[in-house]
């Protein structure tokens, strides 16, 4: 394929005319397709239906540590759930605290807590003139929405192949006491799918923050969400690295089973130093008498241990893999060599990240919508919804079927081509 | 029975010696009894075991409004759950917002939200020099703990037979802009078991607060928790009264199924004006993608409607009634006419409230503990744990068996008698 930028104006116009016809044909079908959110598909949900059978009126509803899971109490979570989520988080059991159904809720509450009560005795952030967070970009819109909601200033940090630009992170964190946190999705990042290198993790562990209440918000949302058995990203465990570096309190790790069992009906946890967990519990003990222990028991009895969870995740991968491959196949075939976009080829997670030519992302998403394809809003992967290059688009292939994805990907590449040609013609 | 205050010193000393022997006999048994927390008993929990069978891999997990309850989404709760909790709250469906597993969590988050974001556009409370809450006393320790945790000044308001002293409430609320809320348990109050009179509810609805972000925190924890079929408290529905009085936004009602189905694994809701719910959702939408819809579905399919819930509550009452009656029987028999204590005889809820002679409550609770009986800490029913008269003790008869309660009540009355005699001897 010849790069579009090498084509003459006449060739581009001819191409455009041809592509417009194709586009009108697809548009005429009146399709409704959605590649916008990282939702598991029905087939994936079906994998966990057995969870609904595990607890019933004929089985004992007492946990192995003797807790009647039907009654009040046990703020930390039942012991078996603590063990399972600790294993999933790769930390000792003493470093885990079980929450409710959503790790997003844990992150939100952690920021809310810092606002009103500070972190481990620090000044409440709401009493400070300025609080800043570093935001590796592109990143997860719901992270950025939390910090924006609390009036925290967000600073973009480029996300490289190896993780956030650590030169920039080290400089900002060590020089500015207002920098209190950084949002990270260290494995199969949302949306690029990259995983942080060992060096990046070690540099995180060795940060020398100006603010003693600086915390790394480590959202390990896709820790076991591999697409392949034989090609997997592995990342260093940050809490342990922080302990070795003499910074045991610097990291807060968030995890959940939302994309393992059922989104909305899973269990979430915070993994951190005992001092951080004690601080979290000082807040939580006023907030609740305890989370849903029956759901904890349900998960523990269903998955049993990490081997059970790994086996389960292989079934998810079997469903997700062909979807990623289908989208990538269309992107490769239709856009390869055209020089009008680049995209990631992740080994896990829920997203493919696409970068168009500068200034085209919004127009591409709008174009796709004309033909009935909903994409994540352009800009969503940046703080304040502002992509400075207007180039990044998050592709979420999990929810549609492979057949739908084939059509959706065709609409997408047509949209990319048409918008890119316009861009080149108007350059 | 002759009142203790009428007895001579000699008679009191003789009585004391006799009671001390009885006390030592009980103490020697090395009992472990607990009348401290309002926890349902095992027999009550067994009533809801069928909840565990309702959802299984063979039934449809789609709600009647077409939502796959296994996946992400639906911030407000599924329609059937909204309807059930709206009925339980006696409000239209448009006035209900479903939360997670705990109404305490909803109340906490409501205060947290007001601290950082204000209420319906008001100044965030954390930006104000002073925020005050009115606290009808005796009341619920966990309410007071929330406001104390957020540094809110608490003002005691006497709880009368008809509800809070409304003369005092009206005066404080209308004169002081720093007064932002009042904690209420309007039905079968914790701990006195009284229910607010119609006049009290109407006076609440007609309050003219100095602060436009003043809210009545109406914790309807025991709305359907009657002990008798033929003797029941009925209270006016406050939201409707507020609407009629032109104050639709003044009340926030909290409810949950914690003591209907399983504590910790129930569903909670906020009932309020649409403007208040929109305000709550502006916060919630950053906090979570949605609560546990499978648990909502489980409850809806199990209880079906309010008739289902009422029938279920009758079974709870059948278990609870003999317990309340046993404790009251011992109190009547052993303390009646002695003039050393008064107690309430509630028709519902989870508590009996006992008032000793001034300055005796702490000593009574300590004495009971000597013999292995744990009571709610004296003072817990007051803000800051400070009962100005040191007289109120909350009795929670729900968890122990009737047989255990008989012994526990005996230890309690022995403790009351011994401490009261000491008080009279030292007067």
Image (cartoon, coloured by chain):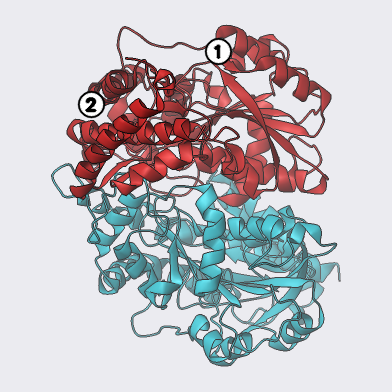
Chain colours: A cyan, B red
**Residue B245 image offset from top left, x and y in percent:** 70, 10
A335 up-or-down from A380: above or below: below
Q: Position of residue A274 (x, y in %)?
A: 49, 73
Q: Please state if A299 lies on the left or on the right of A424 as rendered.
A: left
Closer to the camera, B334 or B326?
B334
Q: In x, y percent, where is residue B18?
A: 25, 34
Where disc 2 sits, the SS reads: helix
The disc numbered 1 marks a residue on which chain? B
Q: Is residue B266 above or below residue A27?
A: above
Residue B111 sits in quarter: top right
Quarter containing the C terminus of chain A: bottom right
Instruction: Give residue A129's position: percent from left, percent from top.
Output: 85, 62
In the rendered image, which residue does mark 2 sit on? B319
**Toward which corner of the image does residue A10 lie, by quadrant?**
bottom right
User: B44 or A33, which lies in front?
Assistant: B44
Q: Quadrant of the N terminus of chain A?
A: bottom right
Mark 2 or mark 1: whose residue is earlier in sequence: 1
Q: Decide which of A310, A126 is in the foreground and name it.
A: A126
Q: CA distance from mark 2 to mark 1?
A: 28 Å
Q: Secondary structure at mark 1?
A: loop
- To the question of a shared chain for discs 2 and 1, the answer is yes
Left or right position of B7 against B95: left
User: For this view, does B39 lie left or right of residue A186?
Assistant: left
* Looking at the image, residue A402 lies above or below residue B191: below
Q: Give the letter of the chain under mark 2.
A: B
Residue projecting furthest to the left? A58
Crowding around mark 2 (Cα neighbors within 10 Å: few <14, some 14 to 19, many 20+) is some
Residue that mark 1 sits on:
B162
How many neighbours does mark 1 have within 10 angstroms: few (below 14), some (14-19), or many (20 or more)?
Answer: some
């Amino acid at each position: 394929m010849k790069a579009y930028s090498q084509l003459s104006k006449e060739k581009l116009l001819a191409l455009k005319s041809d592509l417009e016809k194709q586009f009108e044909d697809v548009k005429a079908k009146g399709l409704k397709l959605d590649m916008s959110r990282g939702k598991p598909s029905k087939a994936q949900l079906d994998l966990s239906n057995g969870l609904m059978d595990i607890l019933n009126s004929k089985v004992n509803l007492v946990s192995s540590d003797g807790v009647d899971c039907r009654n009040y109490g046990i703020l930390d979570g039942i012991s078996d759930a603590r063990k399972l989520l600790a294993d999933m988080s790769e930390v000792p059991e003493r470093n885990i605290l079980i929450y409710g159904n959503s790790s997003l809720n844990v992150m939100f509450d952690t920021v809310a807590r810092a606002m009103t009560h500070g972190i481990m005795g620090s000044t409440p952030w709401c009493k400070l003139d300025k609080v800043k967070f570093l935001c590796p970009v592109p990143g997860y819109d719901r992270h950025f929405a939390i910090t924006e909601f609390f009036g925290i200033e967000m600073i973009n940090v480029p996300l490289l192949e190896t993780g956030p630009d650590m030169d920039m992170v080290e400089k900002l964190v060590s020089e500015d006491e207002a920098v209190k946190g950084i949002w990270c999705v260290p494995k199969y990042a949302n949306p690029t799918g990259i995983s942080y290198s060992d060096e990046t993790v070690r540099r995180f562990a060795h940060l020398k923050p100006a603010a003693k209440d600086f915390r790394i918000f480590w959202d390990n949302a896709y820790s076991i969400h591999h697409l392949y058995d034989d090609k997997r990203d592995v990342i260093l465990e940050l809490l342990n690295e922080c302990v070795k570096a003499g910074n045991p309190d610097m990291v807060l790790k968030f995890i959940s089973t939302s994309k393992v069992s059922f989104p909305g009906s899973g269990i979430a946890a915070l993994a951190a130093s005992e001092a951080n967990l004690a601080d979290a519990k000082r807040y939580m003990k006023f907030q609740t008498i305890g989370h849903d222990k029956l759901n904890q028991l349900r998960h523990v009895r269903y998955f049993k241990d990490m081997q059970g969870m790994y086996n389960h995740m292989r079934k998810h991968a079997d469903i997700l893999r062909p979807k990623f491959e289908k989208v990538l196949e269309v992107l490769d075939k239709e856009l390869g060599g055209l020089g009008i976009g680049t995209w990631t080829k992740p080994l896990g997670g829920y997203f493919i990240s696409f970068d168009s030519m500068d200034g085209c992302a919004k127009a591409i998403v709008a174009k796709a919508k004309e033909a009935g394809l909903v994409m994540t809003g352009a800009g969503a992967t940046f703080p304040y919804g502002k992509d400075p290059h207007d180039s990044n688009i998050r592709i979420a292939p999990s929810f549609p079927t492979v057949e739908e994805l084939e059509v959706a990907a065709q609409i997408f590449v047509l949209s990319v081509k048409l918008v890119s040609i316009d861009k080149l013609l108007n350059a």
